[in-house]
Amino acid sequence: MRFDALYRHARIATEQGRGAGIIEDGSLAVLDGSIAWLGPDRDLPPAASADIDHDCLGALLTPGLIDCHTHLVFAGNRADEFEQRLQGVSYEDIARAGGGIVSTVRATRAASEDDLYSSAADRVAALMAEGVTTVEIKSGYGLDIATEKRILQVARRLGETLPIAVRTTFLGAHAVPPEFASRADEYIDFVCEKMLPAVARLSDAVDAYCDNVGFSLAQTERVFQAAEAHSLPLRLHAEQFSNQRGAELAADYRALSADHLEYLDEAGVKRMAEMGTVAVLLPGAFHFLREKQLPPVDLLRRHTVPIAVASDLNPGSSPIVSLLANMHLACTLFRLTPVEVLRGVTINAARALGLTDRGELAPGKRADFCLWRAESPAELCYWLGGIRPILTVFGGKARHA
């Protein structure tokens, strides 16, 4: 039996859920970009051979990490707002005064595609260096047709020119741009009737920001209906600063995920559980904004809602270019277990993106995985800096640290 590559003598983290286990002295075979075989090395077929035969020397082998919520294509930064918040000004007050998302919109509209690509590629490289093999990238810093298209084109270009897999999300309903000030309903008309048709072919999903500093439930539902007309999957920023019942709406429309969720209540949790909507928790934003309202983790557990964890990488509320740091914060701030967090950045993150071909180590799955100099998967959450994969495999192609 001939494979493209064999990774032998690894400690393989085979499952990221209940009953998570390790195959000691395990081997994994890759063929045509997929996992063709895995199990104890002693059970490897005697005639097995490969073009690449890599001795892992007992290193820990895990699925590649998936960052399922980012806004990493943008221009400029908001360090000035960071200083304002340290002086007690709230995120909501900054947004209402013309800062926040709109300030990044101004900088992004003025940036060229090459400039946006260059800065975003640096951020993606940092994520790849931590073992991220799939990343979701949202638009939402253009809020006009030309810039929204440019952001999504840059995101697609990143996936075409770098080893990482990229999923794109259209987030035109992120904020009201200056030219539509005090006319949010008219802006939603523009998003649904003009912008969405223009960017649909560049988008893998559609998102919206439903909150007291975002859009109303009714406005969000109009975006959902327009997205459905283009057969695009749905996601939602919901219940970050208030409970607008956005998570319930997302579940009603069979959205892939509802994200943030600090103000989610049990009714929303139950509806998400009924409809299979993933809860994406974003501890970086919680930390950076110094929030106090914790997402209802115990309720999510009780009702068996799948929990994903992501970086929310963006210039305003989570300028943290590290999924590993967010994994640590998910444990220390939200009290998730390391097993829950690893599942949250692998199989549940894949589910939040509507992907069934990755996020776990099993025959037939995409060959995305990492080798770590670590004794257990918990070390990926334990360290806050200082741990990186020895090697990452992207769709069967190895990249050394």
Image (tube, rainbow, N blue to C red):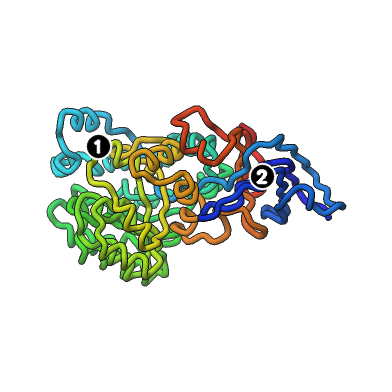
The amino acid type, in three-letter code, at marker 2 is Lys
Q: Quadrant of the N terminus?
A: bottom right
Q: Is residue 310 left or right of residue 357?
A: left
Where is residue 85, by image quadrant?
Answer: top left
Mark 1 or mark 2, earlier in chain: 1
Rendered position, 89 above or below 51: above
Between residues 165 and 44, which one lies in front from this camera angle?
44
- Of badges 1 and 2, the one in the foreground is 1
* Residue 330 spot, x, y in % from top left: 38, 42
- Residue beneath the point at 41% across and 64% down: 233
Determine which of the numbered discs, if any, sits on residue 290 in the image.
Answer: 1
Of helix, strand and loop, which one carries label 1?
Answer: loop
Q: Is residue 24 left or right of residue 263?
A: right
Determine which of the numbered discs, if any, sits on residue 397 in the image.
Answer: 2
* Residue 147 spot, x, y in % from top left: 35, 48
Q: Is residue 392 left or right of residue 214?
A: right
Of helix, strand and loop, which one carries label 2?
Answer: strand
Callout 1–callout 2 Cβ contact below 8 Å = no
